[in-house]
Image (spheres, rainbow, N blue to C red):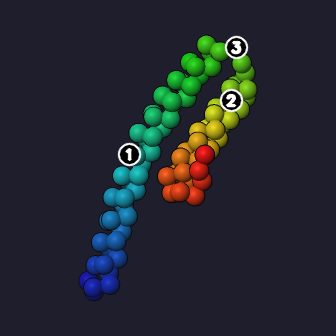
Amino acid sequence: MSEKEKTLEERERALEARERELKEREKKMDAFSRQIHRKKMEWYEHVNLSVGQMNVIVRVVYVLLAIVFLLIVLEAAGIFKL
């Protein structure tokens, strides 16, 4: 076997190992995603809103939190003062 063939075989083995790792990680993430979705649906059952309405509320809250975070960072940097 030439050096080129050896390096190709090594790369191939490394790729196969990486693929196995990615498949295992994907399985774990699928289980995690299902748990989060289940928890989210439990929250939606307690509130008399549709899923779409609840998603809008969650997005608005995230935007407001991002604005507060941005203002804190800008004030700490001395760019923005209240």
Q: Quadrant of the N terminus?
A: bottom left
Is residue 66 in sight in this rendering?
Answer: no
Say few, some or many: other residues with alpha carbon within 10 Å of mark 2 (under 14 / 14 to 19 / 20 or more).
Answer: few
Side (left or right) of 11 relative to 34: left
Seen at 68% across and 26% down, the residue is: 54
Q: Position of residue 35 (x, y in %)?
A: 48, 28
Q: Quadrant of residue 11?
A: bottom left
Instruction: Please give the residue where the numbered disc 2 appears in the rendered image.
Output: 57
Mark 2 or 3, which is nearer the eye?
A: 2
Is residue 57 in sight in this rendering?
Answer: yes
Q: Earlier in the sequence, mark 3 or mark 1?
A: 1
Q: Along the line of sight, which residue is nearer the eye, 8 or 78?
A: 78
Q: Earlier in the sequence, mark 2 or mark 1?
A: 1
Q: Position of residue 61 (x, y in %)?
A: 63, 34
Q: Along the line of sight, which residue is nearer the eye, 11 or 76?
A: 76
On screen, 38 above or below 64?
above
On screen, 67 above or below 41?
below
Disc 3 residue type?
Answer: Asn
Q: Along the line of sight, which residue is nearer the eye, 28 or 62?
A: 62
Q: Circle 3 — which element?
A: loop
Say few, some or many: other residues with alpha carbon within 10 Å of mark 1 (under 14 / 14 to 19 / 20 or more).
Answer: few
Instruction: Please give the residue where the numbered disc 3 appears in the rendered image.
Output: 48
Mark 3 or 1, which is nearer the eye?
A: 3
Instruction: Please give the residue where the numbered disc 1 appears in the rendered image.
Output: 24
Disc 2 residue type?
Answer: Ile
Cα–Cα span, label 2 and label 3: 13 Å
Checking the image for residue 46, the label placed there is none
Cα–Cα span, label 2 and label 1: 34 Å
Tell me if label 3 and label 1 are in contact, CB under 8 Å.
no
Q: Circle 1 — which element?
A: helix
Disc 1 residue type?
Answer: Glu
Seen at 51% across and 57% down, the residue is: 77
